[in-house]
Amino acid sequence: AQKVTQAQTEISVVEKEDVTLDCVYETRDTTYYLFWYKQPPSGELVFLIRRNSFDEQNEISGRYSWNFQKSTSSFNFTITASQVVDSAVYFCALSETNYGGSQGNLIFGKGTKLSVKP
Amino acid sequence: DGGITQSPKYLFRKEGQNVTLSCEQNLNHDAMYWYRQDPGQGLRLIYYSQIVNDFQKGDIAEGYSVSREKKESFPLTVTSAQKNPTAFYLCASSIQAGVVSNEQFFGPGTRLTVL
């Protein structure tokens, strides 16, 4: 069965601190995709990044970086020099690959609520 | 601007009443989804539709119904059979169903409260 675990329910940091959000996944497939979404207080989920299972290069986008390690089945997300605007719930998701009708559906973790205090 | 709209933003319902949540997209996406979000529970899939006139149950379909008569629209009805309907409901779409690389795009959500 496929599963996504975000063990950190809530994290609180002070502005300018670095913070890493953990994501561990389970799948038997060799080809799969992982995603990160941000949900600000307004409620709408915003897509941040997609990574396929064959690409283990780290990704950096401004203050955001992602570390994908197949050996530990992890896809962690780091925010460098956090800002108050980073306060949100962050979700990690895995694309379902059962080759049936639900292929392509997303399996979400329970999310990590990040609070960045000034 | 392309996107997904959900209405209303806030909805109040008396116990025993059915209520319909609207979801419209102008992205020309084939697939649409409905999720329920409860505190600490993440997103749980209610129903999804891969194409017009077709839809499938997700993980928590009991007490809900949907229709997909038009590509742009995927309304969700919360029936009186849903025991605990108070939650935040999110609609999403993706360009094509069944493709593992496709991301989903989300609407702003509807917060339903049963009084």
Image (cartoon, coloured by chain):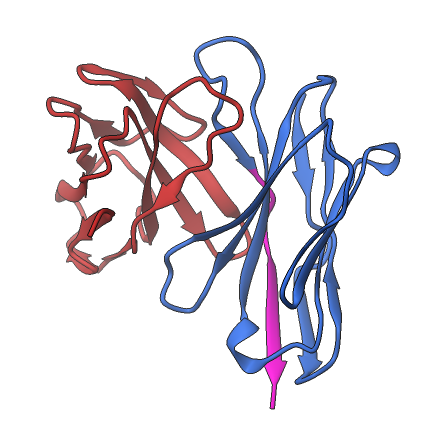
Q: Residue furthest right?
A: A71
Magenta segment boundaries in residue numbering: A108-118
| Quarter the C terminus of chain A occupies | bottom right
Image coordinates of residue A65 in percent, x first then y, are 70, 57
Q: Residue at x 16, y 43 (%)?
A: B22
Q: Residue at x 42, y 69 (%)?
A: A41
User: Which one of the lettered chains is coloured red?
Assistant: B
Q: Is residue A57 left or right of residue A106?
A: right
Count of numbered marks = 0
Image coordinates of residue B81 in percent, x first then y, are 25, 33
Asked if residue B4 is among those painted magenta in the image, a careful observer would answer no
From the viewer's perspective, is residue B77 above or below residue B31? below
Is B59 or A109 nearer to us in this picture?
A109
User: Which one of the lettered chains is coloured blue?
Assistant: A
From the viewer's perspective, is residue A29 above or below residue A10? above
| Quarter the N terminus of chain A occupies | top right
Q: Residue at x 61, y 86 (%)?
A: A117
The quarter holding residue B68 reads top left
Q: Main secondary structure of the magenta part?
A: strand
From the viewer's perspective, is residue B32 above or below residue B7? above
Is A9 or B72 nearer to us in this picture?
B72
Q: Residue at x 66, y 25 (%)?
A: A2
Image coordinates of residue A33 in percent, x first then y, are 61, 30
Asked whether residue A17 is in view, the answer is yes
Asked if residue A117 is among those painted magenta in the image, a careful observer would answer yes
Q: Is residue A46 left or right of residue A51?
A: left
Asked whether residue B79 is in view, the answer is no
